[in-house]
Amino acid sequence: MMLANPLRTARGDAPANDALVIDYAAGALGPAAALLAATHCAMSAQARARLSACEAVGGALLDGGPRAVIADGALASVLARLDAPAPAAPAAPAPERRSAMTDLPAPLARAVGCGLSELRWRMVMPGMREHALDVGADEGVEAKLIKLAAGRSIPRHTHDGLELTLVLTGVYEDESGRYPPGAVAVADGDIEHQPRAGENETCVCFSVAAGGYRIRRPLVEFVRCLFG
Ligand code: ZN
């Protein structure tokens, strides 16, 4: 399974979104996480700039230039670029690519095959619906779209593995912060969190999670979410 926890290994001090793009550029993600990363890059100019920086280093290595030059300069260069503020004009700018036929970013639209309004949603609880995605052979990895009504929260929980949540519409909030469209929230077994939608708009997210969810007090949490 390619979602073991590639985001917090050798780059423990790198922001999670940076680590996701680096792993995507390196081909280190399974199909579900790679689709999430591609969608993240389609939505975020900053992510595209960082992907370009990673690909430039990879291209230099593949070109077979002098080893000493690459070893001394390439890694330092990409790390410096990743640490720097996002450039005003990214190296490889591209408009936010939304399919002409759907309201989803193009990589996700291709995988889903229809628009948000045409999806069949399964109600999990009042205010929360899900649509499971079949995006490849990622054993033990669950990929789905989640629609959370404005102001609604889901039960407080933790994870057996890594969870990536890419915000598609609205605002996603949890104990780690507030995430606008295009941002990726990362959770794992080290934290317990209670995701919720912003007050003013339905939040739709693309979630990729390895392993299961654990809710310590399921009855209490579900009742609180129903009436909270
Ligand atoms: Zn979670």
Image (spheres, rainbow, N blue to C red):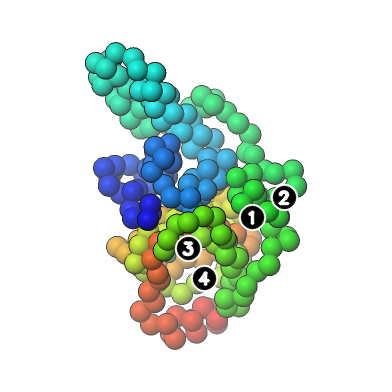
Label 2 within 8 A of ligand 1 by Cβ: no
Circle 3 residue = 142
- Circles 3 and 2: CB atoms closer than 8 Å: no
What residue is drawn where x is 33% and y is 53%?
A: 5
Near-viewer residue (187 or 138): 138
Label 1 CB less than 8 angstroms from ligand 1: no
Earlier residue among tags 4 and 2: 2
Residue at the spot of label 1: 112
* Residue 186 at x, y percent in the picture: 40, 55
Q: Secondary structure at mark 1?
A: helix
Q: Identify the element where label 2 is drawn.
A: loop
Q: Nearer the viewer, mark 3 or mark 2?
A: 3
Q: Earlier in the sequence, mark 1 or mark 3?
A: 1
Residue 126: % across, % down: 60, 78
In which of the image's four quarters is ligand 1 placed? bottom left
Q: Nearer the viewer, mark 2 or mark 1?
A: 1
Label 3 or label 2, whichever comes before in sequence order? 2
Q: Quadrant of the N terminus?
A: bottom left
Q: Are marks 2 and 1 in contact (CB under 8 Å)?
A: yes
The image shows residue 2 at horizontal and vertical percentages of 38, 52
Marks 4 and 2 sit apart, C-alpha to C-alpha, by 27 Å
Place residue 190 in its image quadrant.
Answer: bottom left
Name the residue carrying label 4: 153
Tell me how far mark 1 sits from mark 3, CA to CA. 15 Å
Q: Which residue is mark 2?
A: 102
Question: Crowding at label 3, few (<14), some or many (≥20) Cα neighbours within 10 Å?
Answer: some
Q: Is residue 130 left or right of residue 56?
A: right
Sequence-earlier tag: 4 or 1: 1
Residue type at tag 2:
Thr
